[in-house]
Amino acid sequence: MRSREYDQDFRDRAIRTRDWGVGLLSLAALLWAWCTVLLVTPYAVDEEPDDDYPQECESRLLTERGTANNGLNEGDYCEDERDWPEAVALLAVSLPVSIVGVGLLTVGTMSRRISSYGQTMREIDKLASRSKD
């Protein structure tokens, strides 16, 4: 295999690696958005199956009266509908996805730049050797 073909193959692999990193970072962003929706948006809870008038609940994070945190002991169904462990689990899953995504993005980008730098140096060396002759 000639060096130019090898270099092109190396760059193609670097682009694929970078694209995987972008994809994983996009997945992590979706997980963060889902967690944000769970914590910030208000929601409704059925007290009985097929309830015509569900109980309105404030958001988990931005509550003033505490309706999302009172619990069934006070006759409030809001606490059990959106629980904190679900949001924390989304954040826990997004952390390794983000770390791997950043790593792949960095490796792919740097590999491509190093390959481009090597190609530029080879071209400069060719020009320098021609000018000496």
Image (spheres, grey):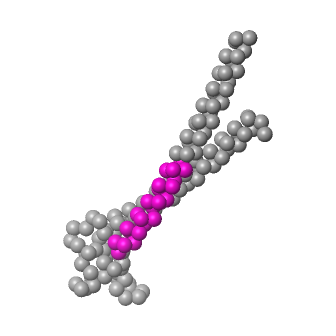
Please give left or right for residue 131 compared with residue 25 in the image. Answer: right
Point out the stretch of residues depicted in magenta.
83-105
Count of numbered labels shown in the rendering:
0
Q: Residue at x 37, y 72 (%)?
A: 85
Q: Where residue 74 appears, x then y in whole percent?
A: 22, 84
Q: Nearer the viewer, residue 109 or 22?
A: 109
Quarter of the rendering occupied by the C terminus: top right
Q: Nearer the viewer, residue 126 or 81?
A: 126
Q: Nearer the viewer, residue 90 or 100?
A: 100
Q: Where residue 76 appears, x then y in whole percent?
A: 27, 82
Q: Nearer the viewer, residue 67 or 30?
A: 30
Q: Is residue 96 magenta?
A: yes
Residue 119 location, quadrant: top right
Our reading of the magenta stretch's main secondary structure is helix
Q: Is residue 102 above or below residue 96?
A: above
Q: Where residue 111 appears, x then y in whole percent?
A: 59, 41
Please give left or right for residue 53 compared with residue 126 in the image. Answer: left
One can see residue 68 in this view: yes
One can see residue 22 in this view: no
Q: Is residue 20 magenta?
A: no
Q: Residue at x 67, y 21 (%)?
A: 125
The residue furthest bottom is: 48
